[in-house]
Amino acid sequence: MTAQLLDGERLAQRIKMELAERVGRLTTNGRTPGLGTLLVGENPSSARYVEMKVEECKEIGVRSFDVHLPSTATQEEIEAVVDQFNANPDVHSILVQLPLPDGIDEEQVLFRVNPAKDVDGLHPTNLGRLVMGAPGPLPCTPAGIVELLAEYEVPVEGKHVVIIGRGLTIGRPLALLMAMRRPNCNAAVTVVHTGVEDMAALTRTADVIVSAAGVPGIVTADMVRPGAAVVGAGTTFAGKRLLSDIADDVVEKVAWITPRLGGVGPMTRAMLLRNAVLAAEKVR
């Protein structure tokens, strides 16, 4: 069996072209979308992530307001930047890059973001909207995974989806999203984690597996059934090499699979840009 690659890079480029048109219309009407980014410290992965966001903002015409604080920044200094972004009418959305340095209360910082400017869709207000099925910015990686599966016509509605990982950014909101009665979702969802006994017994029953564990190679060929779709959403770095949750031998057994590079990552960034544009469109 030859698996079809779920090419997130190609789809993300198309989404960005559509977003650029929307940004153009907004700018013509006197409102250029603005994204405020806050980076604290010198984490290379975080710095690169923010750098990519800034580059992609320029691609589609979104203004970028970037603040980089040293790792010695205090809770008060970090929250003061969030307050400035909240008060700035030219900043329509806010990205606080995680993780923050040790000793900083991340939850308190994130709670301080105006929910209307929450570009990650992870503010409690917006997660509550997701639970209720109300409109609001969706968490970026879960939304990107749903779009990617839909683009390649992977059957999800009425199917069994197993999600490995229960984290706030992917596992928990993705489980909510995919269980909801909405297009390309409406699935039976099982959430497992590394503490579950005989995880393979559950994954082998799945039509779709999404791994967001951040454990290299945790999903192996003997854990998937022939013809399933497998999405690697968890990544780990070994030096500069990006490692996937999906072992190399899985590709020979499944019908659809994300590549190690160019799968979920580009879709996450595209969804963040979509949330940024949507936030600007909603301003009255």
Image (tube, rainbow, N blue to C red):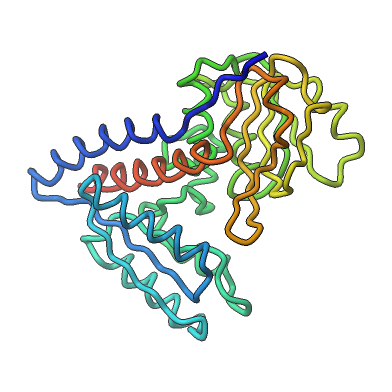
State whether residue 41 is above or below residue 256: below
Q: Percent from the top left, x then y, of residue 198?
A: 91, 34
Q: Is residue 253 toward the left or the right of residue 31 in the image?
A: right
State whether residue 264 is above or below residue 66: above
Residue projecting furthest to the right: 197
Residue at the image position 37 percent from the left and 63 percent from the top: 37
State whether residue 192 is above or below residue 146: below
Q: Is residue 119 toward the left or the right of residue 26 in the image?
A: right
Residue at the image position 17 percent from the left and 51 percent from the top: 32
Q: Percent from the top left, x then y, of residue 66?
A: 32, 67
Q: Percent from the top left, x then y, of residue 49?
A: 45, 58
Q: Nearer the viewer, residue 187 or 245?
A: 245
Q: How many marks?
A: 0
Q: Nearer the viewer, residue 137 or 19?
A: 19
Q: Percent from the top left, x then y, of residue 89?
A: 22, 61
Q: Quadrant of the N terminus?
A: top right
Q: Nearer the viewer, residue 67 or 174?
A: 67
Q: Is residue 137 toward the left or the right of residue 215 in the image?
A: left
Residue at the image position 79 percent from the left and 43 percent from the top: 193
Residue at the image position 78 percent from the left and 33 percent from the top: 220
